[in-house]
Image (cartoon, coloured by chain):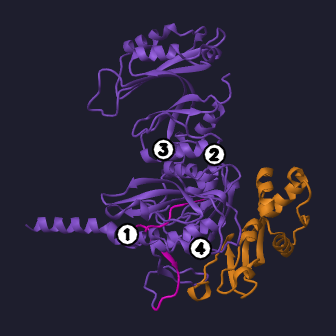
Amino acid sequence: MAPPGILNRYLLLMAQEHLEFRLPEIKSLLSLFGGQFTSSQETYGKSPFWILSIPSEEIARNLMKRTVCAKSIFELWGHGKCPEELYSSLKNYPVEKMVPYLHSDSTYKIKIHTFNKTLTQEEKVKRIDALEFLPFEGKVNLKKPQHIFSILEDYGLDPNHIPENPHNIYFGRWIADGQRELIESYSVKKRHFIGNTSMDAGLSFIMANHGKVKKNDIVFDPFVGTGGLLVASAHFGAYVYGTDIDYNTVHGLGKASRKNQKWRGPDENIRANLRQYGLEKYYLDVLVSDASKPSWRKGTYFDAIITDPPYGIRESTRRTGSQKEIPKGIEKCPESHVPVSLSYHLSDMFFDLLNFSAETLVLGGRLVYWLPVYTPEYTEEMVPWHPCMKLISNCEQKLSSHTSRRLITMEKVKEFENRDQYSHLLSDHFLLYQGHNSFREKYFSGVTKRIAKEEKSSQE
Amino acid sequence: MRLLTHNLLSSHVRGVGPRGFPLRLQATEVRINPVEFNPDFIVRMIPKVEWAALLEAADTLHLIQVPKEPIQGYEHNEEFLRKMHHVLLEVEVLEGTLQCPESGRLFPISRGIPNMLLSDEETET
């Protein structure tokens, strides 16, 4: 057993999607399980191979029970830029740490993975045989070995330029795989109840992980829609609340979003979505409510607020309010006949969201939300700010050539006092974002310009 | 709507402020829906509950065996926790109303879902 204080090195094999979202996910999860992110590498960039130090195997296993960004984790025994370096690195690995997994009563198997190159069976066997110097005393069992070891060879990221020799070779003991299978099993394609903007399953789990959701938490989504984000949090053992201003969506009524389906069936509502995955016991309640005018009493009872507010593109941004003339086609709530049509400026919406989070989150609780940006005008300074909330991460996902959305994660670090409600109004940050209130026009400006160009060229 | 939820809701009618809590509950249809008992979750919720409001709501629904307050050592008292679990999570109001105690404004509950929308004139600035 390694003396306390010595961190063990592990190799994470990462999936190559949502690149920017990966590091914040791993960091959030490590901090959730009592570890801290320590790595000798400056930055990982686009590489799928991450070497990091983790205090214990238990923390490593807990990490893998949550991550959808990492495919597998290995206890790193050696690595190098060429076979010789790998072998000498392996000879330097303490034998007493190897022995528990190599003794004569155990069974094992050695696998080899190559990235961006295919090897022949002969080449693979040669590489495995070259490791004969390792003190393996157990028996090989290819079907159900007790221990699995892996050689991983990194031939870079460019499929058009595959090098003769790998850039890096790693050898380690396989510990666990991540949760990437959740992406398929929770796929929106199979979900009973969906809307136009239901969140992709992978991203919904990433959001729950950025939010450090844990068992017995209460998680709230103020723009709940069809409840996709609640499903992810419930999967990790949190009890969930949702609100939405749209009566039909909350009740699961009205027109269906699926092609070839006209109206929503009786099994299409948020509760049914949770039931589909055996998570109904985590459903607390959903309410029809205006997020700009919340009905929650004073107090801190949410452990996380995880949400995808409307950007005004495929779903309108709305709030309740009177208008001189209510335009035709605006939905009204049959029960309360409240006109729901006043446009909700994006900057006001984030102002309200941050204030609400600062008021109702427990200390240390997280807010995770998507911020739509018009890329030509974006600067980091315009990310909404609040004196009680600390920015943890900001990850971009491109939507089009000139728009993207950013997943913002904030943590509550200070208790809310009444005067905090207004102080960030005075901040320059807040004024900077107001340019995005015309996000909808800017989003479509590229499209309208292109259509005009096409029409012009077809006329010539 | 569960009683845990009722315990967290307040009226946001203009001018009402903290006097908007608790909302007066009236139920025409109630369902008892068993939920898997999770003592750890109930233990976490106990400190967040506003007891007077909970007792008032439980009384309106004619619930019996509702603990009057958290007892000493409740964290390990399974009987207490099971009673609280039942009151907070297993009683669902399907149809009814929530009334602002100050302004009298009614918020309907239908199919178990409260509708808290107010018009602009009615809400806080």
Q: Which mark is residue A22?
A: 3
Chain letter of mark 4 equals A
Q: Residue at x 42, y 43 (%)?
A: A17
Instruction: Identify by letter the chain in purple.
Output: A
Kindly identify the amino acid type of the residue bearing the numbered disc 2. Answer: Leu
Percent position of residue A11, x then y: 51, 30
Q: CA distance from mark 4 to mark 3?
A: 33 Å
Residue pointed to by mark 4: A421
Secondary structure, magenta segment, majority class:
loop
Of the residues under marks 1 and 4, which one precedes in the sequence?
4
Residue A222 lies in magenta, yes or no? no
Nearest the viewer among B94 and A74 is A74
Q: Secondary structure at mark 2?
A: helix
| In the rendered image, residues at marks 1 and 4 fall on the same chain | yes
Q: CA distance from mark 2 to mark 1?
A: 35 Å
Vertical order, A257 against A180 (above or below): below
Nearest the viewer among A310 and A153 is A153
Instruction: Identify by letter the chain in orange.
Output: B
Q: Residue at x 35, y 30 (%)?
A: A156
Chain letter of mark 2 equals A
Circle 4/circle 2 CB separation < 8 Å: no
Of the residues under marks 3 and 2, which one precedes in the sequence?
3
Of the residues under marks 1 and 3, which one precedes in the sequence?
3
Total number of numbered discs in the rendering: 4
